[in-house]
Image: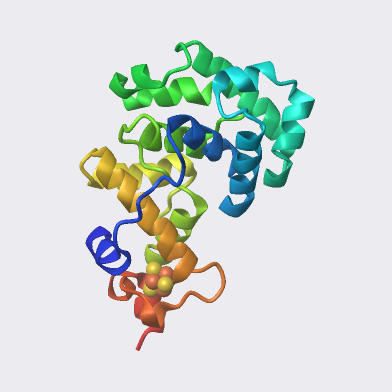
Amino acid sequence: MYDRLLAHYGPQGWWPGDGPFETIVGAILTQNTAWTNAARAIDNLKAAGAMSAAALRAMPEEALAEVVRPSGYFNAKARKLKAMADFLGRYGDTIEPWRTMQPKTLRAELLAVHGIGPETADDIVLYVAGLPSFVMDVYTQRIVDRMLPRHGLRGYDAYQALFERHLPHEAPLFNEYHALLDAHAKDVCTKREPRCASCVLSDLCATGRRTVK
Ligand code: SF4
């Protein structure tokens, strides 16, 4: 799957963003919304001079909510951003110590931060700390469901384990693979009416084999 997706789409150059802190902020702001909305909130944060942990801690929560309004759920996201800024403060406002941590240890610490669920934690472990933790978003789950309709997997961690069990634990591979699956789900394996006839995975996929003659 990986080889075919890479050959078809090419390297995706993820994560979109300017540096580790902006990637953390983006991972929170893109929860339950399209990236375009998160990007508008990021632009607002930059314009307000608030793209740093110290600036987020200093800004009143209500004011921060207004700044990130374009991302939706802005009151909740303001609280999450402040919680993450506090967490980063425990590391001296630098992510450098994260790079040498065990991925599961960092993931567990992130999951204890207010508003950080498994997908956001994995985004940060992989795309900020550069450690191997496979990101399992709804796009990838949709592809898995269609390729292996009888998989019997339940919940985020079970889907994640399917990939982590069968791949070398290398951050560059996990990075590119997640981005490629995302591109594939948006372009071809779409929510409604997947375009199986033009899919590079059709012969590997139970749904594709059934529908492509
Ligand atoms: S063959 Fe169809 S269902 Fe299977 S991965 Fe491709 S687009 Fe999705």
Name the quadrant containing residue 158.
top left
Give me the residue at 64% from left, 50% from top. Answer: 37
Residue 117 position in % (x across, y down)? 54, 33
Q: Is residue 206 left or right of residue 87?
A: left
What quarter of the picture does the C terminus occupy?
A: bottom left
Q: Foreground: 56 or 103? A: 56
Residue 47 position in % (x across, y down)? 64, 36
Give me the residue at 45% from left, 47% from top. Answer: 16
Give me the residue at 38% from left, 53% from top. Answer: 179
Q: Is residue 212 above or below residue 50?
A: below
Q: Foreground: 111 or 5? A: 5
Q: Foreground: 26 or 42? A: 42
Color theme of the render:
rainbow
**Rendering quadrant holding ligand 1:** bottom left
Residue 19 position in % (x across, y down)? 43, 34
| Residue 209 visible here | yes
Name the quadrant containing residue 67.
top right
Q: Is residue 23 left or right of residue 176?
A: right
| Residue 149 visible here | no
Name the quadrant containing residue 129.
top left
Residue 103 position in % (x across, y down)? 34, 27
Q: Is residue 26 left or right of residue 175?
A: right
Count of picture labels = 0
What quarter of the picture does the N terminus occupy?
A: bottom left
Q: Foreground: 170 or 74? A: 74
Q: Is residue 186 above or below residue 77?
A: below
Q: Is residue 211 above or below residue 102?
A: below
Give me the residue at 57% from left, 72% from top. Answer: 192
